[in-house]
Image: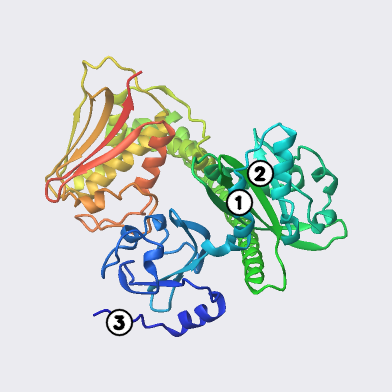
Amino acid sequence: MMTKPEFTEAITDYIISKIPPYIGLAILHLNEDAQLQNWLGPVHKYVDIKPELGMDIEQLTPFLIGMVPPLINPMVLPHIQTKADHYAEIHIVEDELQQFWVFFVDQTRSAEKLQQLLQEVNSARLKLSASTKKNAQVENHFSAFYLLDFATFAYQNNAYFPLGPLPVWTKELNNASALHKNQVDLVEVFPFIEVFQYEAASCWENRQDGKVESGVWEEETITGRQFFLKATAIRHEQTNYLLINIINREDRQDSELIQKAREQRLTLDQLARTQKELKKLLDFKNQFVSIVSHDLRSPLGAVIGLSNLLLDDSEMMQKMNENQSGLLTDIKEEMQRLLDYNDKLYHWSNLELGNFKINKTEIDFRELTAYVERMQHFKLKQKNIRFKQEIDKTIDFVLMADETLLGQALNNLVGNAVKFTPEGGQITIGTRLKQGNFEIFINDTGVGMPKEISDKLFEGFTRKSTMGTYGEKGTGLGLGIVKKIVEAHEFDINVESEPGKGSTFIIRAPLD
């Protein structure tokens, strides 16, 4: 037998201070996995299926998909249609035990004060038309609405037509004169209506009678006084209406609506401040990258200059054997590549935004793989790993890419393969045509990885770095940089791997 939910102190305080004492309050208690633990009140009014213990919240309430856990705590969703004939204000709250509470506050009764007048309209079966007689009939049936502080309009052919007198509060508006016309531009008077019209359209375009209520918005009068308004879109007997009423400050229910409007505005202000702070952090990041890249240029340039000086010295070169001169040439070429890469790193923020201009040239893939092998030579030799090339010579395709960036990506991938390949293994780099794509693949006979790791391998930079078979340490940036470089070329990359069977990284370039 199910017991009543045990309210924590925080939830008890929330119910007392935030939940108005409306008839029809229903409560759902969920565990940390958003599964139903208890419920209280007329839950059947808001859901179509019978609640059961352990049921997932999204199964019970499809209209709350993605809402639990809440993005902000508490999260208040005003005027949600839970069933065809029911609307509710929904509060989603996380308590101090990391459990969740969902409160349904009935809003179906919010139009009760209009019901008697609407019944009169129902009996007349009003339809807006061009005839004077029917227009007069409409005017008569809506003539009393202004006494309840409603400004009433018929909506037809994307235009608004006033029905009956306007309430007193409309005289205080900045554009009050715009309301006293046969056809009113409501957006000019209430800019908020332009947004609400999209929601109202779901009601107006329906063949059945119904209504949709807006949130509360704030207006300022010609004297600087502020008041709050709310709109209701109604579909009745194939005719569309829009009612706008002022919120009474003294009414408890209205006061809470005003407070919610203020809280929503504070939330937007907080988001704006957060966005401003985030921009500052991004600017600092760009400045930091700029400073580091600038400071690296001098030592890189010095090494390149010294290499040129030695290579141009014939007497010095005669004293070197072939291996030494080759190493010196490799040092110079690598420093030049590193300098070029450093310059591209300077514009890394543009790469993040997708507007980085890469320098594409025709790639000689054999030269590129030879460069990668030279860069990994000592690590390959240390672990006695065989480096193999499988270049398909029959492929009639010219790869256009930025040689420095693509070389860096391949160097990172091969370096990663060396790290996780045990002594005596093999790394293969090659090209092939497969399923309409030109593929570059790097295959190793390393330790491999389970699917839960390979699926998340390219989700971004990480501070974690797995130790290699020789205890090698990484920066955690390699694969993140590879992904950015591949995306900048508009290529794709993925990995195929199994524990104990090695890994294959595949870069795909579509055939033009």
Which type of secondary structure does the marked residue at label 1 adopt? helix
Percent across and percent down for residue 293 are 53, 46
- Quick one: label 3 or label 2, which is nearer the N terminus? 3
Q: State whether residue 282 is above or below residue 178.
A: below
Which type of secondary structure does the marked residue at label 2 adopt? helix
Residue at the image position 16 percent from the left and 50 percent from the top: 447
Q: Nearer the viewer, mark 1 or mark 2?
A: 2
**Residue 453 left/right relative to 310:** left
Q: Which residue matches tag 2?
A: 194
- Quick one: label 1 or label 3, which is nearer the N terminus? 3
Q: Which residue matches tag 1?
A: 283
Quadrant assignment, res 181: top right
Q: Nearer the viewer, mark 1 or mark 3?
A: 3
Q: State whether residue 470 is above or below residue 139.
A: below
Tag 1 near tag 3, CB within 8 Å: no
| Colour scheme of the picture | rainbow
Q: Which residue matches tag 3?
A: 3
Q: Is residue 306 visible?
A: no
Percent across and percent down for residue 406 are 37, 33
- Using the numbered discs, state the Cα–Cα distance from disc 1 to disc 3 in whole angstroms: 55 Å
- Using the numbered discs, state the Cα–Cα distance from disc 1 to disc 2 in whole angstroms: 35 Å
Is residue 438 or residue 157 the one in the foreground?
A: 157
- Using the numbered discs, state the Cα–Cα distance from disc 3 to disc 2 in whole angstroms: 48 Å
The local crowd at label 2, few if under 14, some if 14 to 19, many if 20 or more residues have their Cα within 10 Å, is few
